[in-house]
Image: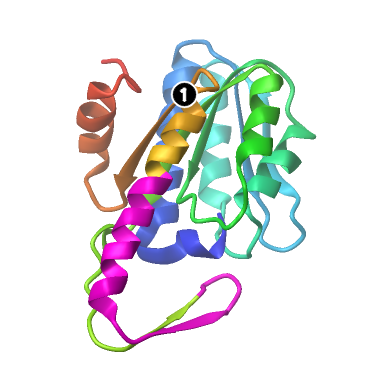
Amino acid sequence: ASTSMLFEDKLVRAKQLAAAFGVMALQSVEKVSAYAIHQQDGQPWRLPGGTGRAKIRPMLQFFEQVEGGGAVPIESAIETMLRFHRGRGIAIIISDFLTLGDLTRPLNLLYSSGLEVWGLQVLAPSEIQPDVQGDLRFVDSETGETLDITNAAELLNVYHDQRLWLQETLDTMCRRRNGRFTSIDSVTPLNTVLMDQLCRLGWVRR
């Protein structure tokens, strides 16, 4: 729930997906817990593990209360979460994964804790297909750092290469830890994402 997730409703989509996965798991009598990193002190909003349909309402209320903000890197967020988590199963990480950090250690920690690593990347449409031209100044939404660009066309080619490289790297990292990875946008209707895209990829069963 870092500041970058506030861009073009990425956090809204992440919360919707987390709630949908949680409901499906609880209806299947699976134990569900959830974590969202606090924007100020780094401590997670935590939904303790529970099972059964009676836990659906508290879980939905938990996700409704999650707000975005701050600059807590996903890698440190995962390590913080593991201080609280108990139990084996599947860890679904919903994020834009736009981090400068190395995810190897936190994903190893998840896997060594008995958790399959499933990564679900949520990107804004303008992050997938940026519409830029001319001279630009980029501002990091979390650190405030700036970068001036004078050749946007050349930059776009580099950007697309790096975005695809990141997704391929994340896919490999998740699969090596007995999991899976996919990337979606923040604007496709939720029902289409769940019942079409994720069904075809084996994330969701009808």
Q: Choose between 199 and 104: the one closer to the eye.
A: 104
Q: Position of residue 174 (x, y in %)?
A: 49, 28
45 vs 59: above or below? below
Amino acid type of the residue that numbered disc 1 sits on in the rendered structure:
Arg
Q: Position of residue 117 (x, y in %)?
A: 54, 26
Q: Choose between 37 and 31: the one closer to the eye.
A: 37
- The residue sitting at 26% across, 64% down in the picture is 157
Q: Position of residue 50 (x, y in %)?
A: 64, 21
Figure quadrant of residue 160 = bottom left
Q: Residue furthest top?
A: 29
**Quadrant (top left/top right/bottom left/bottom right) for the C terminus:** top left
Residue for badge 1? 175
Specify start and end residues of the magenta stretch as a single range. 140-166
Q: Position of residue 19 (x, y in %)?
A: 45, 35
Q: Is residue 109 magenta?
A: no
Residue 200 makes an appearance in the image: yes
- The residue sitting at 31% across, 52% down in the picture is 186
- The residue sitting at 31% across, 43% down in the picture is 184
- The residue sitting at 37% across, 59% down in the picture is 9
Q: Choose between 106 and 10: the one closer to the eye.
A: 106
Q: Choose between 193 and 139: the one closer to the eye.
A: 139
**Quadrant (top left/top right/bottom left/bottom right) for the N terminus:** bottom right
Q: Is residue 153 magenta?
A: yes
Instruction: Identify the element where label 1 is drawn.
Output: helix
